[in-house]
Image (cartoon, rainbow, N blue to C red):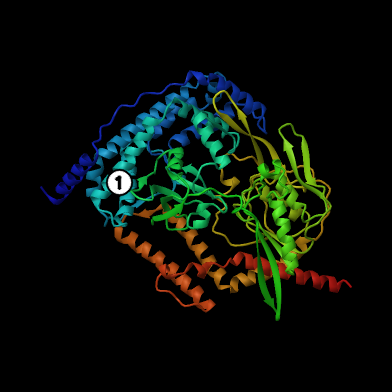
């Protein structure tokens, strides 16, 4: 018996000893009879309540078919091209299926998918020991891990080769993490067994929910159907009544991916988890990590939730990394507390020509209001507007020259609070227009003529600023009340309502937001007057990156005053801003890092499966990052470091964006004073 044969024997014995594997034929699923009424209600709601009142017809059916197939096999790993050709006979039948309350064809598609997955995973588990032991890591071959490039394979032989390369990529990743071949086989076996277990646990209601959601999501990405189990989970999330990590997650291909970090939540405080990070394993405070690749999202979420003050470990693939290096982080579970999400202030001091200028900064993570305290008659109830007003008064007493309202990463919240907050900066006037499904337009505005702050100001936004944040930023821009700085906002300009159905709930898009200028915040979001460099890629983050978003459009504008002709200031302000970016060591390092990450994105299309080359790439990336950091430190007069692990957190605590916003505001004040002097 040669070495490879011995290794295969040892690995196989280890697997059998740990847990015997026996494939079981899965039962074909059929439509649940109690959901016929739900189908009728869904048609009525989708056609009659949705903002577009789109008829559920063949055009919607074609989109729904693609959505259904993609939700089952997003990485094109199980169906063959001929399967898709055969299943295409159902492309124009999804509308008929829901109208007739007979989605049998959806179950025909699912049962074929179930058969393909069962066969593929069973075969993979059986072949893993031999596959892993046979891998030649000196061979020059590549794996395309970009899901956008995935195609349906023409035959089993081609699909076998795709899986061989995928397993080799995963094996090499674990191998570079100092894992033995035996450990790798055990780990991957558990992963594929988990996927089979998920398949076994999928029932007829789960398939119906996927079918219904394929039709709902064909109308827009925020319309969805929740079966009873999913509905309960959704309501829990809305109430934030269970402890967790404070992150919004979604299923992306086989991975659980971070969509948004909740401001002031546990993950935000811990500081290492970021949007677009992929979670590959979850572990509790002690014990082994559980591989969650291919696992249902609600099951992953259940593993991440837990008792307050307990710890959860996440193995992630960082979005800012090279796509190959994994990282394990630990987060202490907690509730997202209202007081932690409260508005907070600071003062940035800038020295110019021997004079000190104070710029007040108010960070607002969300638009909140303690409705329970308000209803209980508490005169000192907390709200974003009341807290912001109080902080403004304190900042004015400290003699600030200008104000920055920081709405970065603010995902929205109370519309009433957004409206009231805008009233702190204008005497009175409209703030937002809302158009419903019937075409009626209503205006929400500020009627209180009191003014908390009338001086120069700026609003900071980024790609994660959404909904109510976009309303405030858009109103500040339209009124010419201040500068909008940062990045293009998310583009979430629609309003959803929940409607109960016989089994579960429907979240339906019912209205659309419009700025006082008549422009929608939907899809396009708010464009900054001056743009800041950012890691967030608007092509993969934001409303426009989602499937089937409602389009941007425009209605009539309202009557409102314009306080400053901001566009007249932009050319000179932007010139000074870009000059500072080119001279500031922090921004130089940031631009270099962003450029490096963009270049890394292409590597997903051709990940080397050669161990020596993979190691070289990883080391090169570490060296590039270290060189960049030391170049920055030298320019700032800081000591250089021998390793990235030697960097103290306080070294990078400074928010260079806020400081640049303060610099721009001082430029604005200076230009305004110069223009005023010239006009005399």
Single out the residue that lies furthest toward the left.
Answer: 1
Whether residue 86 is visible here, answered yes or no, is no
Quarter of the image where the C terminus is located: bottom right
Front-most of 387 and 451? 387
Give neighbour class at mark 1: few <14, some 14-19, many 20+ (Cα, 10 Å): some
Q: Is residue 308 above or below residue 204?
A: below
Instruction: Label 1: state its secondary structure.
Output: helix
Front-most of 443 and 166? 443
Q: How many marks?
A: 1
Q: Residue at x 35, y 34 (%)?
A: 197
Front-most of 209 and 133? 209
Q: Is residue 210 left or right of residue 611?
A: right
Task: Give residue 615's quadrant in the image.
Answer: bottom left
Q: Is residue 291 left or right of residue 583?
A: left
List x then y, in percent, for residue 217.
56, 35
List x then y, in percent, for residue 107.
44, 24
Name the residue beneath numbered marker 1.
187
Q: Is residue 35 above or below residue 428?
A: above
List x then y, in percent, for residue 635.
53, 77
Single out the residue that lies furthest toward the right.
Answer: 680
List x then y, in percent, for residue 296.
43, 38
Whether residue 443 is visible here, answered yes or no, is yes
Q: Is residue 495 left or right of residue 163?
A: right
Q: Residue at x 22, y 44 (%)?
A: 130
Front-most of 37 and 628? 37
């Amino acid at each position: 018996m040669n070495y490879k044969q011995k290794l295969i024997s040892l690995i196989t014995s280890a697997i059998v000893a740990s847990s015997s594997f026996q494939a079981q034929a899965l039962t074909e699923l059929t439509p649940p009879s109690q959901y016929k009424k739900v189908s009728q209600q869904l048609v009525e709601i989708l056609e009659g309540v949705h903002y577009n009142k789109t008829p559920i017809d063949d055009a919607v059916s074609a989109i729904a078919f693609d959505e259904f197939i993609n939700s089952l096999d997003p990485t094109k790993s199980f169906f063959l091209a001929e399967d898709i050709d055969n299943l295409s006979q159902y492309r124009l039948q999804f509308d008929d299926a829901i109208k007739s309350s007979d989605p049998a064809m959806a179950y025909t598609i699912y049962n074929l998918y179930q058969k393909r997955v069962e066969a593929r995973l069973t075969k993979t588990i059986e072949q893993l020991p031999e596959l892993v032991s046979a891998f030649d890591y000196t061979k020059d071959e590549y794996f395309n891990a970009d899901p956008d490039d995935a195609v349906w394979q023409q035959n089993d032989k081609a699909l076998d080769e795709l899986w061989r390369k995928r397993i080799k990529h995963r094996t090499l990743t674990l191998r570079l993490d100092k894992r033995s071949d035996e450990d790798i086989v055990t780990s991957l076996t558990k992963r594929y067994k988990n996927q089979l277990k998920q398949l076994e646990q999928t029932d007829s209601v789960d398939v119906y929910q996927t079918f219904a959601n394929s039709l709902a999501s064909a109308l827009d990405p925020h319309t969805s159907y929740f079966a009873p189990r999913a509905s309960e989970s959704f309501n829990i999330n809305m109430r934030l009544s269970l402890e967790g990590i404070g992150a919004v997650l979604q299923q992306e291909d086989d991975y659980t991916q971070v969509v948004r970090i909740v401001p002031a939540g546990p993950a935000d405080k811990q500081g290492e988890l970021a949007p677009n990070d992929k979670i590959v394993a979850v572990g509790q405070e002690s014990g082994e990590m559980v591989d969650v690749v291919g696992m249902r999202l609600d099951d992953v979420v259940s593993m991440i939730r837990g008792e307050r003050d307990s710890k959860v470990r996440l193995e992630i693939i960082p979005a800012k990394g090279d796509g190959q290096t994994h990282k394990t982080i630990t987060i202490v579970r907690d509730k997202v507390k209202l007081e932690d999400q409260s508005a907070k202030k600071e003062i940035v001091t800038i020295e110019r020509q021997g004079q000190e200028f104070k710029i007040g900064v108010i960070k607002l993570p969300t638009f909140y209001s303690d409705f329970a305290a308000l209803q209980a008659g508490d005169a000192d109830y907390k709200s974003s507007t009341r807290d912001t007003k109080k902080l403004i008064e304190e900042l004015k007493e400290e003699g600030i020259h200008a104000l920055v309202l920081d709405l970065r990463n603010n995902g929205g919240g109370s519309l009433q609070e957004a409206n009231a907050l805008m009233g702190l900066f204008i005497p009175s006037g409209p703030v937002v227009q809302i158009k419903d499904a019937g075409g009626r337009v209503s205006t929400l505005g500020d009627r209180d003529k009191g003014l908390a702050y009338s001086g120069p100001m700026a609003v900071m936004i980024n790609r994660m600023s959404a909904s109510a944040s976009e309303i405030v930023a858009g109103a500040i821009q339209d009124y010419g009340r201040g500068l909008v700085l940062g990045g293009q906002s998310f583009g979430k300009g629609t309003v959803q309502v929940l409607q109960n159905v016989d089994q579960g709930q429907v979240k339906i898009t019912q209205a659309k937001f419009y700025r006082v200028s008549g422009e929608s915040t939907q899809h396009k979001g708010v464009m900054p007057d001056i743009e800041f460099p950012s890691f967030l890629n608007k092509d993969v983050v934001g409303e426009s990156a989602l499937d089937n978003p409602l389009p941007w459009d425009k209605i009539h504008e309202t009557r409102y005053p314009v306080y400053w002709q901001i566009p007249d200031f932009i050319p000179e302000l932007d010139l000074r801003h870009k000059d500072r970016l080119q001279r500031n060591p922090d921004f130089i390092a940031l631009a270099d890092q962003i450029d490096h990450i963009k270049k890394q994105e292409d590597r997903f299309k051709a990940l080397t499966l050669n161990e020596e080359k993979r190691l070289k790439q990883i080391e090169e990336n570490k060296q590039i990052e270290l060189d960049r950091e030391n170049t920055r430190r030298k320019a700032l007069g800081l000591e250089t470091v021998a390793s990235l692990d030697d960097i103290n957190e306080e070294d990078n605590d400074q928010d260079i964006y806020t400081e640049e916003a303060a610099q721009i505001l001082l430029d604005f004040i200076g230009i305004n004073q110069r223009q005023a002097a010239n006009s005399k």
